[in-house]
Structures are given as structure tokens and as C-alpha cells.
Image (cartoon, rainbow, N blue to C red):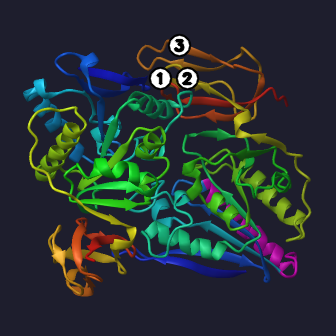
Amino acid sequence: MIETVAKLELPVGEHIVIRKNRLVPVEGEQAANGRMTLVSGIHGDELEGQYICYEVGRRVREHPEYLRGILDIFPALNPLGIDTAHRTVPKINMDMNRMFPGDPAGGMMDRVVAAVVSDIIGSDICLDIHASDSFVREIPQVRLSQDFAEKLLPFAMLTNVDMIWKNATATVHESTLAHSLNVLNVPALVVEMGQGQSVNRQYGDQVVDGIFNVMSHMGLWTGPVNETQIPAVSDDGEVEFIRSEETGIFLPLMAHNHYVRRSDVIGEIVDPYSGTIKSRVCAPVGGLLFTLRVYPVVYEGDLLARILGQP
Amino acid sequence: MFIKDLYTIRSTYREDMKVRGYQFGKGEKSACIVGSLRGDEIQQMYICARLVHILKELESNGCISAGRQILVIPEVSAYAINIGTRFFGVYDADLNRSFPGSRYGEPAARLANALMAEMGDYVYGIQFTSFYMKGEFVPHVRMMETGYQNASLANLFGLPYVMVRKPAPIDTKTLNFNWQNEATAAFSVYTNQNEQVDEKSASQAVAAVLRFLTRMGIIRYESHSGYISHVLYESDLSDVNAASGGIFRGMALAGQDVRYGNPIAQIIDPFDGSVKETIKAPTDGIVFFAHTDSLIGENDVAYRLIHRLHE
């Protein structure tokens, strides 16, 4: 059933409405063994979660008899952003994932995020689905804050992602939804995958299989589950960031999600005016090329790739 | 006066963006003054430009104290200013949420890091900044409650109010917060405009900075004594939120004394022109912040009042 979690009046003939689809066991909510919440669309340019929300809902609708828990699906926490391909909240230009936990007595968006947090409290697990941005492509991965890694790792291992990255960067920053929920004792995982403004169905299916695997282990799903993999687990020390030291056009020479050897040429930075190669970008370590730039224009300091180094 | 190139960002398609500082005097790094960190902070850039003009004259008259050095950086975001965007680069980076930055990070992080290396050693740091919501403030000096703040020093600007704000997680990447962490006494000065130049409040801000520099013995300058500032904590303010969305007809200005129950704004129906809501003052007080945008959403902050304070 589609439920409204927050609804506030915009200036002219419209409301900002945060909706969720609540799926419950055939026997009713009272028969539920627990609750999982799927959240997506905090950043309006990240659309991979739209497919995941659809596909999870579709599989449950196909076999509602297997559902043993409550499943809440929020496809769009930032509906104005998704509708207009804005990463941030339009008009105020604020990153919604820096506004949590919000304030129930604050301004419009403070109240919206507070209502979302309030609604999710009580869930036994929450997955916040992200899609990198429009500039780099990512393999399916779960990012965990070091502060909560011990508690979250057992759930993350079930998600069928390629990699679990325990880190302390902005993705898991204090004012994010995931951090706020973890502080409030709702285990919350951040899933990153694919790239902004697009949908990779293969990655989506992989993560959806993982979601059903998690549900199965938590007793929320009794149906068959596709075979899943055990992800590689890494921390910041094993991840090598490769940044541009030039301005120009980045042309990758390696495919994403492939293993590279030390000194392999990952790509070139070229000058379209002079027709020259300004620099060749080499792998500083061997390992899995799990992040690769897709947006060609680069400035000094822009992220080109990340490699998960091999021990 | 000595012009220092502080940092350069190179682009394939545009001229280099040079961040320049205007240095007056020599010796102890006494005061650093920063204007526009965001592309729409035109008033902030203008105030700094006027300060450069006056300090140049003072220096030629021998009025910079011996052994004291002042650095003025009118703007650090010409790329954004020149295309009319608030934020910087293709990532829409908020430079005032990029400190302390990193020399190995994204372009905005590198710029912030380079600025911090230059500005971090100053005894006093003064930043002209802006709020994310469109509106007018009474001119005031704002400080973060980091444990290092000194409201008594902020009084010496002679502006009507000093506001002390308890930092939220989102504040920890601001220039003000990081300046204080570097043991610089940091002050953010708010005037009542951003995108438009307002001569009156710009003159007030210029006078406040010159007054402060005089009182700190950094320059010799005869100026009016200004106000004995009223020190406020953000928690002392009463927010007045709109109960509905529509066209905003403000009836009280920043700095105005309002009385309990008096009408201070109306929300007009955008279709039929009827008054949807009359907002009344919930308390006696002075308007600290007034919403000025023509439109308002449900629960947006219309006013922030200084509770039970009179002119």
C-alpha cells in the first residue's frame, strides 16, 4: 500500500510528498517477523535505486506468500530533485544527505527529513541505495562507517555486493541518513553502485538478489533466493585513490571492474586544442579497478579511479 | 600593498582562476579578511574591495601599525561568480563546506587546503558570508561555540549583535570553524544582502572591520564607537514558520521592533489573491532574520525573532 510519510505545501498548487510502499505478509502486519526499509533517491541524480525499488516490489508482488516481514520501500526521498535531475534539494541547493536527522519543529526540509527518520525508526534494517554520481562508475559495494562496522558487517556480507569498504569519508558522514539511523539503533547500510543518471540492470539484479538474501537470513522472506557471493572486505588503507594532476580530457584505456597490474596505463589526459597527450595515468598498485571516471572533463584533483590493492 | 597569488585553478576552456590576496603592512600575521567564498556573495566581495581601497590609502598615509600584517581576499570563486552560480565547479562544491580541505583531494578541497595554509596563521580571521535561505539579517557578527570563541572580542566590531551558534555536524567544514580550530579568533560578519550590493550595510560592515582593526592596534583610524553589542545565543531566537505555502507578503523588516499578536506577514493565495494566512508575532521582540523571497513553502522560516528584546 502506498502511504504518505510527509506532505508539505509548496508555494504554488503543489505539495512535496514523501511516499513509501508498505508491503506486508498475506496474513497481515501483525504476523510480521520484522521490518526492512529500502531507501533511495536522496540525491536526485542517482537513479540506480529506482530499478532496485521496482524489482524488489515486483518480486514480492509475484510471490506475496513468501513475505514474512514488513518491507517499506521509499524510491524517492528527494522527489523534486529526481524529477528535475538535481542532485541537491532544488531551490535551497542543499545536499539532503547532510540534513539528517532534521528537526520536527524546523523549516520545511528539516521537517521532511525528521518525518522520514521517525518513520524508519523501528525497522530491523535499512538499506540506503546510492549510485555514485555522474562523474565516476562504481561496482556494487557497501560502505560502512568504522564506528558501526562491527554491528553492520554481518548484514553487509549478505548483500551480494562485490566489495565492502569500511571507511570514514563523506558517504558515511555524521549528518547522513545512515549515520543518524545507526545512532538511533537502526542498522543502516549505504549501498553504492553504477553511476549517476543511469540504470545498470545487471548491477541492480545483483543487489536485489542480495536484498532477498538479507531478508531470508532475517526471517522476512521464505521463498527461494538466488545464489550470492561473499564480498571482498577492505578498509581505507587498501584503497588507492588516483586523481588527475592535469586539466584536460580523460580517456580511459582500461575497462571498469577489471584487475590491473602495477604500472598499467589506466588512461590518458589529452588536450583537445593542441592534439597532445598531457599525461598518462598509471596504476600505482595492482588490484581491482573498482571506480573509473566516466565524465571526461577533468581538473587538477579530480578523481579518475580507485583501485582495491591486492595483498 | 602587495598582491599575492594564493592559488591557481587551471581549466582547459577558461582562463586560469587566480585567487589573490591583498597584503598590507609587514610582520605578525594579524588579520585576514575573506569575502566571497560562493558565487552569489557579491555584497561580500564588494565590502572587501572597499576595504582594499581604504587600507591602501591608510598604508600610504603610514596608518598600518608597525609589525602588523593584514591580508584581504575579496573572492575565491571567480569561476562561479562569472557564470552566476552559488557553488563551485561541475560538482557544485560549496567552498564554505570544504575546509580544512586536503592537498590530495578534489579541486575544492585543494583550494580550501591552500587557503587554509595561507590563512591559518593569522591572529584574527574575519569572513563575510551568507545564509542558505534568501532573507535579510540585522548586521551581526557570528561565532561558532567551539570552546575557543571569544564573544568579548566580537563586541569590538561595534555591530548591534553578536550571535553564538552551537556547531552542527554540517558546520565543521566551514572556514569559521576551522579557523578557530587553528587558534585563529574567527568572526563571520553578516550584512543584509548577498547578490545585490547594498551601500548602506556595506558601509556599516567596512566601518565595523576598521573599528575592530583599530581597537586591536593593527591600524590607526578614527572611527565612530559603534554599538555596545548585544550577545545572543542561537537558541535565544524564536522561529516563526509559515503554516501554508504561497506568495509571501512581509510586513516587518530586519531590525524592526514587533509586538505580540501584531500581524507581521501575510501568505497570499497564488491563484485568487485571497489571504490564506496572517502571520502574527508570537512574542515581543526584534526581527533578527526576515524571509525576503516572494514565495514561501509550508513551515519555511518567515522570521527569526529576538525574544523579548526591545529597541
Residue A219 position by quadrant: top left
* Nearest to N terminus: mark 3 or mark 2: 2
Q: Chain of mark 3?
A: B
Do the residues marked 3 and 2 share a common chain?
A: yes
Where residue A280 appears, as percent x and y from the top left, is: 25, 85
Q: Secondary structure at mark 3?
A: strand
Query: Is residue A247 highlighted in magenta?
Result: no
Residue B242, labelled with which disc?
A: 2
Residue A162 position by quadrant: bottom left
Q: Is residue B84 left or right of residue B132?
A: left
Query: Identity of the amino acid at label 3?
Result: Val
Residue B30 vertical placement versus A177 (above, below): below
Do the residues marked 3 and 1 share a common chain?
A: yes
Q: Secondary structure at mark 2?
A: loop
Q: Which residues are magenta?
A: B43-67
Q: For mark 1, what is the residue?
A: B245
Q: Is residue B30 left or right of residue B302?
A: right
Q: For mark 3, what is the residue?
A: B275
Mark 2 and mark 1 residues within 8 Å of each other at the beta carbon:
yes
Residue at 22% across, 71% down: A289
Q: Is residue A294 left or right of residue B227?
A: left
Q: Badge 3: few (under 14), some or many (20 or more) residues near its Cα, within 10 Å?
A: some
Between the C-alphas of marks 2 and 1, the distance is 7 Å
Where residue A7 appears, as percent x and y from the top left, is: 39, 23
